Image (spheres, rainbow, N blue to C red):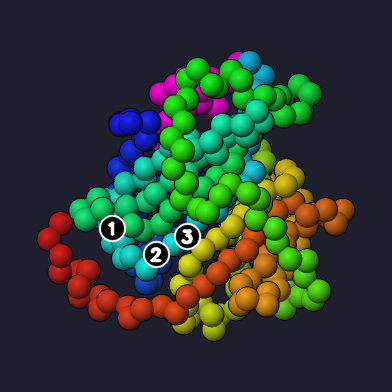
């Protein structure tokens, strides 16, 4: 449903979408946001399967999300609300909110940057052909759309390697953007995960990788207490970088509060 330029879609989380603290997982938030984006573009006949006929492809290059300590239980619906917040000659910015359906309590909010890639030239195309179809709602969920600059790490606190498997691939046979996030967050220290919950995540996707490619993920702490996760390929090129921030977790509800609910 589109109202005043904003698209809304209701989802029901599965058990795998929920953390032990009854929060939506980072992977789930990214997945449902992207699904809503695809649904909005489908309404305007601008979905991936529409523009591929013109030898074009959607590419998401940046994603930023601020997460609230809002419980989200299995089987309780939530809403993804999104809109095109800015359209430049080469970039499409889409802002979004994730809300509990019953109370409209904010679960998370953020922004994203998309581009159109020409499949033949592998160059970015202008967004001129989108202007007549997409309504721009200039409401930002972040301070601005200016690119977030990450610090250059001087040393690393953890390093791991991951060889891309079929489970990491998307329908284009690339390592999916959600897989990069999952791999990167595996470098978080256990003691942090045991006592804190995700507060924000910023992702820059830079290069494609494919089946059987080896990815090296390095994690380093920054001066402000955040965590920088850098993924490089076998040639040493940075293919994805993330900045995660964490906050002390609130008290975990007793499991009986979940099991005794009326479904």
- In the rendered image, residue 55, in percent from the top left (x then y), is placed at 67, 19
Cα gap from disc 3 to disc 2, whole angstroms: 7 Å
The magenta stretch is 34-53
Cα gap from disc 2 to disc 1, whole angstroms: 9 Å
Q: Are marks 1 and 3 in contact (CB under 8 Å)?
A: no
Disc 1: CA contacts within 10 A as few (<14), some (14-19) or many (>=20) = some
**Is 47 in the magenta?**
yes
* Residue position marked by numbered label 2 in the rendering: 68
Q: Earlier in the sequence, mark 2 or mark 1?
A: 2
Please give the label number shown on residue 183.
Answer: none
- In the rendered image, residue 218, in percent from the top left (x then y), is placed at 73, 68
Q: Are marks 3 and 2 in contact (CB under 8 Å)?
A: yes
**Is 25 in the magenta?**
no
Magenta span main SS? helix
* Residue position marked by numbered label 3 in the rendering: 66
- In the rendered image, residue 109, in percent from the top left (x then y), is placed at 43, 53
* Residue position marked by numbered label 1 in the rendering: 105
- Front in this rendered view, residue 52 or 220: 220
Q: Are marks 2 and 1 in contact (CB under 8 Å)?
A: yes
Disc 3: CA contacts within 10 A as few (<14), some (14-19) or many (>=20) = some
Q: Is residue 109 left or right of residue 54?
A: left
Kindly state the secondary structure of the residue where label 2 is placed.
loop
Name the residue: 40% across, 60% down: 24
């Amino acid at each position: 449903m589109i109202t005043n330029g904003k698209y809304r879609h209701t989802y029901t989380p599965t058990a795998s979408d929920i953390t032990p603290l009854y929060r939506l997982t980072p992977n789930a938030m990214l997945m449902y946001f992207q699904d809503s984006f695809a649904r909005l573009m489908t309404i305007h006949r601008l979905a991936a399967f529409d523009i591929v006929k013109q030898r074009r492809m959607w590419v998401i290059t940046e994603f930023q999300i601020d997460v609230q300590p809002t419980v989200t239980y299995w089987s309780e619906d939530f809403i993804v609300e999104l809109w095109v917040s800015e359209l430049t000659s080469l970039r499409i910015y889409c802002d979004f909110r994730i809300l509990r359906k019953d109370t409209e309590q904010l679960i998370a909010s953020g922004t994203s940057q998309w581009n159109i890639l020409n499949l033949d030239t592998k160059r970015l195309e202008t967004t001129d052909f989108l202007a007549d179809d997409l309504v721009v709602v200039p409401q930002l969920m972040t301070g601005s759309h200016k690119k977030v600059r990450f610090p250059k790490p001087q040393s690393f606190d953890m390093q791991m390697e991951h060889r891309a498997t079929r489970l990491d691939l998307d329908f284009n046979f690339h390592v999916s953007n959600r897989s990069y996030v999952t791999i990167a967050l595996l470098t978080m220290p256990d003691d942090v995960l045991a006592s804190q919950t995700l507060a924000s995540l910023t992702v820059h996707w830079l290069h494609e990788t494919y089946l059987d490619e080896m990815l090296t993920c390095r994690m380093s702490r920054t001066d402000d207490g955040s965590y920088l996760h850098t993924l490089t390929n076998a040639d040493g090129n940075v293919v994805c970088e993330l900045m995660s921030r964490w906050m002390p977790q609130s008290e975990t509800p007793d499991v009986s509060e979940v099991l005794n609910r009326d479904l």
